[in-house]
Amino acid sequence: MKTSLQSLGVQGSQAIATLGLVIALGQGLHWADYLILFLISSLVAMVPITIGGAGARELTFLYGSQFLDIHAEKAVAIGFLFYLISTSVSFFGIIYSFHKDRIFETGNASNE
């Protein structure tokens, strides 16, 4: 149950971030269409056909925009910007993974 709630929280946060991208690109009137495409693209990005879902998300936005009759360029831009932002934020996890001992150091070294 806890994991499901955490997953829902992460997906909700990603949807809010995507909504911010939709509004920033001036597509606020079609926010629901873009959020539906985002949720579908999240499912498509899990299919192991690309590295980290790169390209799969953008293709979903491209084909979905044609189906929903919204701006294809802006739809692909939303998918690509989301990918760039999530990748750059995830990059900081590498620092945590390799240096968590130093991050959580309590200062015991100064007492030696």
Image (cartoon, rainbow, N blue to C red):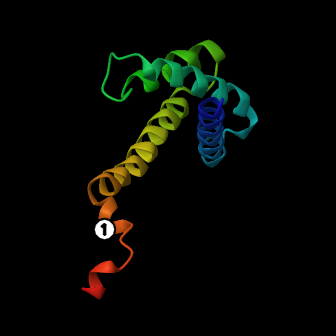
In the image, 29: left or right of 107? right
Q: Residue furthest bottom?
A: 111
- Note whether 9 is above or below 112 in the view shown: above
- Note whether 66 is above or below 82 in the view shown: above
- State the image quarter where residue 27 is shown: top right
Count numbered badges in the picture: 1
Residue visible at 41% across and 16% down in the picture: 47
- State the image quarter where residue 17 is shown: top right
What residue is shown with label 1?
Answer: 102
Locate the C terminus by quadrant.
bottom left
Residue 10 in sight in this render: yes
Expressed as whole percent of the image width and height from the top left, the position of residue 41 reads 52, 23
Residue 59 in sight in this render: no
Q: Residue furthest right?
A: 29
Expressed as whole percent of the image width and height from the top left, the position of residue 4 reads 63, 29
Residue visible at 44% across and 21% down in the picture: 46
Residue visible at 36% across and 67% down in the picture: 103
The amino acid marked with disc number 1 is Arg
Q: Residue furthest front?
A: 112
- State the image quarter where residue 105 is shown: bottom left
Residue visible at 44% across and 23% down in the picture: 45
Expressed as whole percent of the image width and height from the top left, the position of residue 21 reads 59, 44
Locate the N terminus by quadrant.
top right
Q: Nearer the viewer, residue 79 or 8?
A: 8
- Note whether 112 is above or below 42 in the view shown: below
**Number of residues whose C-alpha sits closer than 10 Å to that of mark 1, classed few (under 14), some (14–19) or many (20 or more):** few
Q: Secondary structure at mark 1?
A: helix
